[in-house]
């Protein structure tokens, strides 16, 4: 079997030959940002929103893309990478990471002219239909992250620790709670349905501005579902009729139990289902029976 192809520092090459310096600031400091895009049949989903968020992350941490990207920029690189990996059909993900490059270790920025490290990989993706249709369990955990969660930074230690805790609890997601407020999942946006209205945390420093979040909010508004972007308090939990999490790879997945207790009726609810139907209708995708 031929090796997967990746893009690193200006070249496409086999994954097995890709090397990054041990002085790379991504390795030493987690000094970098990333994006995960989804591709269907060679088309990037909501790509403009992903490029905008990447630009915003870069601005926030004063990172710039390396000079000399091909015409067409990141989009062209992502599409070329999909094609080189035979992923022009079916479902795939594209991972993109940009770090401040390799330089002798100092906390402050490296000398001007240090070339940022740009890495892209692509992989076939099996859509998680079971989670989307049957729903998942989630746990809550204290949100111990910093106050710049709007940056899609590669510093993901709180997120990886939380996911591991969830896994050990037999759950698929950990929902962070900051000062009594549900902020977001370790890799998802969190939505609740209360009295027929959709509630999610406002964008700002405590959550990542999810690409899927915007899609879901637009679909809800178009369907006439009242939308409230406001802090969602854990103490309101008894009034959650429905809860779901959303992301680029998950789409929308009902949360049927939180911390081992059923949410609402303990099964995917009607508002979640309506939004899932609208989501797939907008993409022209026929999902397996959502139930
Ligand atoms: C912390 C966090 N929140 C939310 C999301 C969902 O964002 P998106 O819909 O852009 O994938 C992600 C995705 O990875 C995430 O890591």
Image (tube, rainbow, N blue to C red):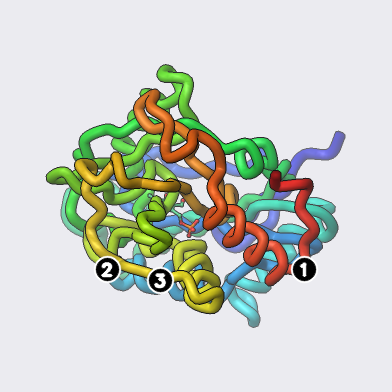
Q: CA distance from mark 1 to mark 2?
A: 35 Å
Q: Is residue 84 visible?
A: no
At a point 27% along the width and 47% down the height, the residue shown is 182
Question: How dense is the environment of label 1, judged by Cα within 10 Å: few (below 14), some, or many (20 and up)?
Answer: few
Query: Residue 142, position in %: x, y?
Result: 21, 35
At a point 64% along the width and 82% down the height, the residue shown is 71
At a point 47% along the width and 70% down the height, the residue shown is 225
Judged left or right of residue 249, residue 99 is: left
Q: Is residue 289 above or below residue 84?
A: above
Residue 284's disc is 1
Question: How dense is the environment of label 2, judged by Cα within 10 Å: few (below 14), some, or many (20 and up)?
Answer: few
Q: Quadrant of the C terminus?
A: top right
Residue found farthest to the top: 168
Asked if the residues shown at circle 1 and circle 3 are in contact, with their CB atoms under 8 angstroms apart, the answer is no
Give the residue at mark 3.
226
Query: Residue 121, position in %: x, y?
Result: 63, 50
Q: Secondary structure at mark 2?
A: helix
Residue at disc 1, CB closer than 8 Å to ligand 1: no
Q: Is residue 35 above or below residue 21?
A: below
Q: Is residue 263 visible?
A: yes
Asked if the residues shown at circle 1 and circle 2 are in contact, with their CB atoms under 8 angstroms apart, the answer is no
At a point 41% along the width and 54% down the height, the residue shown is 193
Q: Is residue 119 above or below residue 173?
A: below
Residue found farthest to the bottom: 71
Residue at disc 2, CB closer than 8 Å to ligand 1: no
Q: Quadrant of residue 284?
A: bottom right
Q: Secondary structure at mark 3?
A: loop
Give the residue at mark 2.
60
Question: Mark 3 or mark 2: which comes first in sequence?
Answer: 2
Eye-nearest disc, 3 or 2: 3
Asked if the residues shown at circle 3 and circle 2 are in contact, with their CB atoms under 8 angstroms apart, the answer is no
Question: Mark 1 or mark 3: which comes first in sequence?
Answer: 3
């Amino acid at each position: 079997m031929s090796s997967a192809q990746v893009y690193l520092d200006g070249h496409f090459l086999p994954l097995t030959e890709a090397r990054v310096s041990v002085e790379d600031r991504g390795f030493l400091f987690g000094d970098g940002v990333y994006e995960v895009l989804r591709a269907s049949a060679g088309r990037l989903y909501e790509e403009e929103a992903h490029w905008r968020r990447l630009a915003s992350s870069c601005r926030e941490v004063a990172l710039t893309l390396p000079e000399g990207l091909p015409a067409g920029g990141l989009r062209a690189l992502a599409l070329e990478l999909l094609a080189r990996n035979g992923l022009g059909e079916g479902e795939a993900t594209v991972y993109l990471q940009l770090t401040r490059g390799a330089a002798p270790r100092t906390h402050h920025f490296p000398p001007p002219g240090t070339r940022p490290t740009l890495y892209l990989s692509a992989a076939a993706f099996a859509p998680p239909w079971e989670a989307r249709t049957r729903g998942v369990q989630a746990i809550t955990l204290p949100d111990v992250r910093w106050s710049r969660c709007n940056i899609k930074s590669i510093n993901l230690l709180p997120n990886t620790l939380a996911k591991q805790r969830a896994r050990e609890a037999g759950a698929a997601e950990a929902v962070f709670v900051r000062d009594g407020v549900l902020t977001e999942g370790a890799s998802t946006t969190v939505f609740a349905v209360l009295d027929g209205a959709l509630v999610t945390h406002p964008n700002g420093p405590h959550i990542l501005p999810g690409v899927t979040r915007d899609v879901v909010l637009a679909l809800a508004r178009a369907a006439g579902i009242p939308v409230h972007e406001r802090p969602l308090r854990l103490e309101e939990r008894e009034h959650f009729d429905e809860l779901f999490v959303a992301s680029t790879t998950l789409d929308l997945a009902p949360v049927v139990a939180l911390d081992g207790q059923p949410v609402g009726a303990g099964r995917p609810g009607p508002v979640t289902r309506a939004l899932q139907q609208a989501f797939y209708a907008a993409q022209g995708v026929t999902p397996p029976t959502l139930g």
